[in-house]
Amino acid sequence: MLPSPPQTPQPPPAAAFRFSDTLCVATIGDCHLTDSTIQPLHFPKLQKLALKRVGISESSLHTMIAGCPALQCLLIYRSFGFGRLRINSINLRGICVKAYSYGRGLKFGELIIENAPFLGSLILSDRLHVSLIYAPKLEALGFLSSTCSSVLAFDSAVIQVVVAFLLAFLPAFPCADEEHTISTSD
């Protein structure tokens, strides 16, 4: 089954980023972030950012990430409007990417890690051209692949990295007040 084309998402309401100076975790989804929306934003305390099905230009994406000096975890899920992402972040610990691929539009095809001294894990689910320039602490590079039956195939090391990465986002959910242990051993 082919993914459906991105519909023209609406920009978020003006009040959506009212607390950008104090946010520690943010999930932005199903919207279009214009250059004029992103340009004035600064997220000095943001540690975890998830962009889900967001339309955003390459320059706005770079501006947004540059405006997050405390960023530790970045998730980009089926977002579109950019072809390349350059990472220059001294605090980033993990990146997880599921690119959007539909039709002949601009496709996210290149990830460049220029300067990420503390990046420990990089999880990719699509064929991206990845350039690692400086990521000395990178310990886990995982690729999630879909089989013809749309079942994800993982090896146990990748599962552990994905689980650790996803658990880093649990504090964003107020109902998740228990600590859970997930084991991949048989």
Image: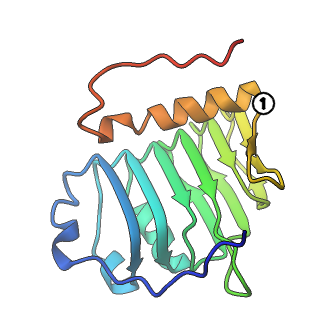
The image quadrant where one finds the N terminus is bottom right
Residue at x 72% of width, y 12% of height: 186
Residue 24 appears at what percent x and percent y? 28, 46
Pick the front one: 2 or 121: 2
- Helix, strand, or loop for circle 1? loop
Residue at x 60% of width, y 35% of height: 162
Residue at the outermost right position: 148
User: Which residue is disc 1 drawn over?
Assistant: 155
Would you say 110 lies left or right of 161 here?
right
Q: Tell me which corner region of the image, top left, top right, bottom left or bottom right, holds residue 154.
A: top right
Residue 127 appears at what percent x and percent y? 79, 60
Would you say 98 lies left or right of 146 here?
left
Residue 147 appears at what percent x and percent y? 82, 51
Residue 106 appears at what percent x and percent y? 67, 83
Residue at the outermost top position: 186
Q: Estimate how packed mark 1 is, as few (under 14), some (14 to 19) or many (20 or more) residues with alpha carbons within 10 Å.
A: few
Amino acid on which the number 1 mark rests in the picture: Asp
